[in-house]
Amino acid sequence: MLWDRRPLGRGYINSMSQVAIGQVKQALGAPVSDFSLTSVDDARSSLKAYLEGKKGAVVLFWSGVCSHCGRYDQYLNSFASQHPEIGFVAIASRQDETPEEIRATIAERKLTFPILLDPGSRVAQQWYAQQTPRAFLIDAGRILLYRGAIDNFRYSDDGEYVAYLEPAISQFLAGAPVARGETPSFGCDIRSVYYSLPKML
């Protein structure tokens, strides 16, 4: 669990994970919910569109201001060419991150992967996503096969580097069970309780 270390009274407040207490995560092997969101170009799209003609898809909760996400720009830009049989879409759910900021990020970092806007973090909450980046691998029937981190946040030439998402994709495409269906997520909070609290004098 990630913590927002800003003090509140004598204690600390944590992130959206506490808001979601009582919410049940999707079960691995069960279908995830569909969604319909708009892109930064104001085009409406659904999860179904990214699954059309594909064996499955990766849905990534993402933020342009999260440095953890920035580490994966090259990987995400090349995802479609590396995995033509797998659809991909990023969902920008970060609280208070505006479409204008996201457009500026796309231009500055030359991002080419599809990004949909999730105002109010509605889809993030439905999918129990609390940090960015958080990846979900599903099959063509929206069955959840993997959720968690892309890797252990080390560079690929590091001796301790461990990939999580890529082995899950390879196993799925080979028709084998995904050996590790879930890994812990870490990164930037999508929504902080701090910003939802009344201002204190």
Image (cartoon, grey):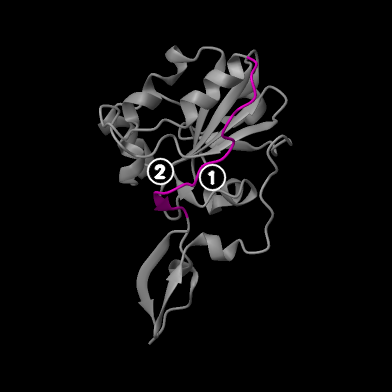
Main secondary-structure element of the magenta-colored stretch: loop
Instruction: Classify residue 12 as left or right of residue 143.
Output: left
Image coordinates of residue 60 in percent, x first then y, are 50, 36
Where's residue 181, x and y in %?
A: 59, 36
Three-letter residue code for mark 1: Asp
| Left or right: 136, with 195 as reference point | right
For this orientation, the residue located farthest to the front is 159
In the picture of the structure, the residue carrying the numbered disc 1 is 118
- SS of the residue at dot 1? loop
Residue at figure coordinates x 46%, y 50% from the top left: 131
Image: 94 above or below 83: below
Badge nearest the viewer, 2 or 1: 2
Q: Which one is earlier in the sequence, the residue at label 2 or at label 1?
A: 2
Across and down, in percent, residue 57 comes to 58, 25
Residue 184 covered by magenta stretch: yes
Numbered badge on residue 110: none
State the quadrant of the C terminus: bottom left
Residue 104 lies, in percent from the top left, at 31, 38
Tag 2 residue: 63
Q: Which residues are magenta?
A: 175-190
Residue at 69% x, 38% y is 32
